[in-house]
Image (cartoon, rainbow, N blue to C red):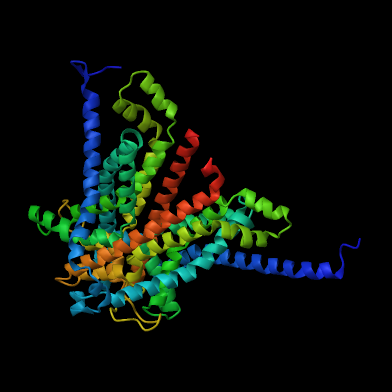
Amino acid sequence: MTLLTDEVVAKVHPTKLRGWAFWSAMSMLALLGAAIVFLIVAFLLSESFPLIAQGGPIRFFTDEGWWPRDASFNMTPMVLASLYLTIGALVVATPLSLAISLVTTFKAPARLAHVLHNLVELSAAVPTVVYGLWGVSSIVPIVNIWSPPGASLLAGVLIVALMIIPTITVLTQSALQTVPTAYVQGATALGVSTSQTLLRIVIPAARQGIFSAMVLGAARAIGETMVVLMVCGNIVQVPTSLFDPVRALTANIALEMPYAMGDHRASLFVAGLLMLLLVSALVAVGEWVGMRQRKMIS
Amino acid sequence: MRRFHVFGFDVRDFVWTFVMYGLTLTAVAMLLWPLLTVFGNGLQVLSWDFLLASPEDAGRSGGIAPILVSTLGIVLVSLTAALPLAFGVAVMLTEGFNPAGWPATILRCSLDILAGIPSVVFGLFGLSLFCRQLELGYSILAGGLTLACMILPTLARSLAFSLESAGVAHRAGGAALGLSKQSVLWHVMVPVALPGICAGVVLALTRALAETAVLLFTSGYSDRMPESVLDSGRSVSVHIYDLSTNVPGGTPNAYGSALALLLLLALLSFTVHALTRWMQRRMTGNTTRSL
């Protein structure tokens, strides 16, 4: 009964007060952190809404061309350029990433695997602008010898592929690691050769994880700005060959934003909104499939 | 299973293995090529003078001192803004909210979406909110605040992870001694998780240093020495972009700047690794190691 003396109460109260202050401060900070996404979407919508309201969203694919000064905003060539770049980069990067992942996970001796792993991690940390610089001064001149002007869809595909190899490799490695060792041991015990074990047992067992790695790699490729801005030539056109210069949607935003005004500016926010939707959809699909892989195995 | 044997030698296995190693070699060569090019070309330019001099002739000659200062300013602003937010998010995710409840779910989802947003979209947002609405113009402050939004998910995730891995035992021990939740957090969990928290901060720092697209139209192009955070300032990455595309003959110095940036990133990554190892040792305890 004598426990709750005035002294004790006086000691307890400041603590409670401090606790209340602490937790409300933390909640406010967390709320602000969560609000940023909504702020971004709100700003993109409010900046692009006037233009979307003018002619409906279809106009961005049916206008005569990309002549923003004459209020003609056809983004089809740039959307196609972004898609071609992404698909091309995936086609180049996936086999290479899969090979590195298989070698490091199943074949290479531990020390070599460690070295390869470090190389991949190091490459993942290289800023994209450095890849762009290297592309401009090394790859573009080589493509130029082959077929001028050099700054082209092909150069973009190669460098974006290089850029997403680390992403796809790391994710594929973790997908391969979810394959139970018993599968590999069983196959070996049955006398199946190593390559057949990998092709017929390991890859099918990890296929969802590999697919998820590809989709997340695609999300990175399509959102990439600096490389495509620097090595693709930046001409608005639907490419007819790999050697045509193209302008990707992201590169267009970066090129025109510094001077765009009025409806032109709004059209770039529409492009940003489109980009946000595309990338979010890809990430959602990738994460969902990746989660199924982890659940399926464990 | 059918097999393709020639004199007892499995041809199919050999061909597949050959293809796999061939592809791996190609990939390794592709990954090494840019790194070696940057090292080879950068070493010819990089020196103390290059780091300490001002750029001249649009960056073709001279050094990158003001650009390093602007970069430092941008990165510091972004960390200062992002760290409290990330700490709040991490604390609420690990200690505050019920992990299965709807506030935690919304918070986690919003972080996931934020992590996926392409950097050019962050640039648009920063230009619209910080440069125009809040009238900060093209400045180090605007660029840093935009970058803060971009690194928030990375930072919050690694802080939450290190607080989580600080373990149930510490939390339970603190609670058993009658400490309040916030005292346990502040006096037990944070000190224990400190190496992990530092590693997260350095990781976020590397992301911020590597970023270009966001800064192109938020922090501006000026290559003079900035006098305050409201001045326009050019980050190293923007400098590399500008030299390689807009300045004919700027490539050698672009390589010098790229090498400086890569070495800085390598140093920071090394720090992350060291801190992570320290964290792991701390978590597993020295007793298990001595056994």
- Percent across and percent down for residue B235 are 32, 71
**Outermost residue, right side:** A1
User: Can residue B263 be seen by looking at this rendering?
Assistant: yes
Query: Closest to the observer: A268 or A162?
Result: A162
Name the side, left or right, on which B215 lies relative to B111.
left
Name the side, left or right, on which B43 lies relative to B74.
left
- Percent across and percent down for residue B119 are 37, 62
In the displayed structure, would residue B15 be above or below residue B61?
above
**Outermost residue, front side:** B290
- Percent across and percent down for residue A53 are 41, 67
* Quarter of the picture holding the N terminus of chain A: bottom right
**How many badges with numbers are in the image?**
0
Question: Could you tell me which residue is drawn at 64 percent across and 49 percent down?
Answer: B169
Query: Closest to the observer: A97 or A157?
Result: A97
**Outermost residue, left side:** A145
User: Can residue A208 be seen by looking at this rendering?
Assistant: no
In the displayed structure, would residue A82 be above or below residue B145?
above
- Percent across and percent down for residue B158 are 49, 56
**Outermost residue, bottom side:** B227
Question: Could you tell me which residue is drawn at 21 percent across and 65 percent down?
Answer: B255
Question: Could you tell me which residue is drawn at 27 percent across and 69 percent down?
Answer: A255
Residue B261 placement: quadrant: bottom left
Query: Closest to the observer: A296 or B282?
Result: B282
Question: Could you tell me which residue is drawn at 46 percent across and 53 percent down?
Answer: B276
Residue A211 placement: quadrant: top left
